[in-house]
Amino acid sequence: MAPKKKSQTKGKGSSSRKHPDTSLSLLLEIGTEELPSAFFPKALDDLELLATEMFKSSRLKHDSLQTFGTPRRLALVVKGVQSKQASLVEEVLGPPKAAAFDSVGNPTKAAEGFAKSQGVPVAHLREMETPKGLYVYVDKSQPGQLAKRVLADAIPKLLAQLYFPKAMRWNVSRVKFARPIRWIVAMLGKEVLSFEFAGIRSSVRTRGHRYFLIKGKKAGQGFPLRNANSYVAAMKKLGVLVDPDERRKEIIQQISALAKSARGQIDPVYREELIEEAIWGVEYPHAIFGTFSKEFLALPKPVLISSMKEHQGFFSLVGKDGVLLPKFLAVTNTPWGDAKLIAKGNERVLSARLNDAQYFFKEDRKHSLHERVSALNGVMFHGKLGTMRQKADRIRDLVGWMAKKLGHDDLQEGCERAALLSKADLTTGMVGEFPNLQGIMGEEYAQHDGERPEVCRAIGEQYLPRFPDDLLPTSLPGILVACADRCDSIVAFFVVGMVPSGSEDPLGLRRAAYGLVRMVNETPLRLNMVEVVDHMIQIVTKQGVVQSLSQTSTEIVGFIIDRLRFYGRDRMGLREDVMEAVTRVRPSTMADLRDLLSRMRALQAIVSQPDFEILMNGFKRAHRIVEKEAWNHTEVFPERFQHQSEHRLVQVLDKAQHQVADFVNKQEYGDALYALLTFTSPIDDFFSAVLVNDSDPHIRENRLSLLTSIDRLFLTIANFSYIQSAGAEVG
């Protein structure tokens, strides 16, 4: 029988150490070519997680763990690392006791063989109770190794596990990493941890800021570090702020002071995004001030802001009235350069960009959006779904139908016009240069063309929300066009078989569905999603789109409801069992998303009440009986009742049926649920007093019909059988 091992570590926690001098600091720094800012801070989060797991699996105690990062490095500092592993005690399981010893307690060959294989005398064998009975085992102690040796073996494995959205190979090692690795620092205290990764041998030599001079020598050429514990301070002397929090504080302080001196305020639209970008774009921040010609202020504000943000990462400045100023701020990586010269260079670059934007703006307005619609025939939406013109036509057909369905015939024409023009700005030079301005420029050009205000606004709002926490459209035409656009994408891609699987969603359909859920719940929009999806399928089919899968509206709506559940969990704190109970009975008949959320809120508000817990016990018992018997009749005959509890239960049922129906029609689900609480005592008394499966078939059938009526009444709100008890795990 092969030995089985059960491991356990022995050692004191960091807080109770008696010999602090035996602990050291670990430094790991991976120096690279410039890393994309988008890779931070997840890379540092992953490094922290992997390092924590490494220390745990290596049986090395430590006090604190912190990650650092700049565009040219990922770093890890772990303080209070024990100089030696905790010892390991293994309980090695051997044969059953009955096989190891005979009837008088003498060891058998099985016991002797096991003891010999473990290098201990038979007398050291001990007994252990297991699920399979008594077995013999032996304790084996394995002394801990030096931390230096353990970490030198473990760190390369940690580095190999770091994941990046895009990775590359650059040398004969064939190792994949975000960018080529140029140096590795690995130290425990003052000593180097010697290993090789990606063809690079670890050392104590780091590299400072490329442009910083120390004793007449460029810091970027490399300097040795003396002690892992002084990493942050040592790097500052080399012109590098390795702590991103320190860089953030420095950036905010500098740009705030510059904005104040320029008599302006930083435009809030992209402020946080630009600060984050700056943090991961520099190793030592230096904010500078610049200006541009006032003639460019004639351009729409979004064009100016995008020109500054997208290509240069500049901060826009506005006055107290919110009007854009011909000024900007930039965060550079050269604190030791000529600030005025750097500012002039940035001004020249921005001027060239704004000249391009000015040219596009002038040329684009030579053709109206309506004239550009035909050009959409040359812009592909997707190979299986045709052109952007075909998509615009589908959106127009759906939004017109939606407006009429909601009783807004007066908005139908404007909505259809906005939908037809919605994608026309994709053919403009401005959107070609600044893709993030699609919709925004459409609204601008529509206003120039003299389109009606509601049409212009709907075009501008069609892409909202662009991300989960973004603003929503505020005009009803804008809401309708935005919803129709998302419905078209979801349904059309489902129809041609391009359905998200697992975590993969390259077409952004989950994001589209989440935006749809937000609009339906947070705006005045009320839509039956089953009807909407059915109509959208008809529109797609009429265009001649070849179906790869026979997707029904229920399956597509199920996908949308999955996002609704994510929304309920993420934004409303709804329980999984509560959402499951509601969605189990609603999507197949009437997928009014707001109605679903209203039911969920009301149900969650009542599930924690003691009376509801008691009621659920009775309901679930009734539901199981009805389900098991597959009973479908609800006609009850009072003359067949044998006990007073049956009379009482049917009286409560008669009253509750009218109350619940009235409350449900008014969508007052909280009151409907309180009406169901009246069943708590009667249904409990019923099961205590009578046997449902009576020997008399007529009495049995009558009781089954009574329970079926109750079951169906409850199911008008939710399937309560999915509600978990208060002590259960509800997610």
Image: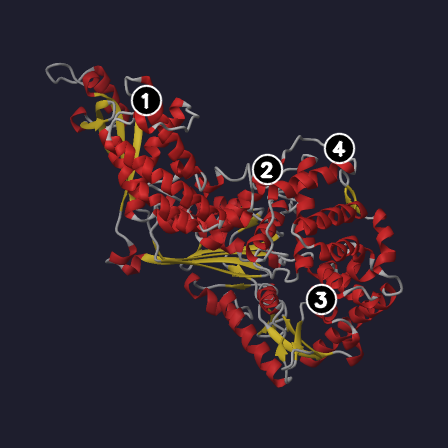
Can you tell which quarter of the image residue 92 is in? top left
Dots 1, 3 in contact, CB < 8 A: no
Task: Name the residue nearer the viewer: 190 or 65.
Answer: 65
User: Which amino acid, mark 3?
Assistant: Ser
Residue at x-position 51% and y-position 67%? 235
Q: How is the image coloured?
A: secondary structure
Of label 1 and label 2, which has the lower sequence position?
Answer: 2
Q: Are marks 1 and 2 in contact (CB under 8 Å)?
A: no
Nearer the observer, disc 1 or disc 4? 1
Q: Secondary structure at mark 2?
A: loop
Question: Under tag 4, what secondary structure?
Answer: loop
Of callouts 4 and 2, the N-terminal one: 2
User: Mark 1 belongs to which amino acid?
Assistant: Arg
Residue 658 vs residue 37, the one in the foreground: 658
Q: According to the image, label 1 marks what residue?
A: 700
- The amino acid on which the numbered mark 4 sits, given as a three-letter code, is Val
Image-based side of 647 in relation to 576, left or right: left
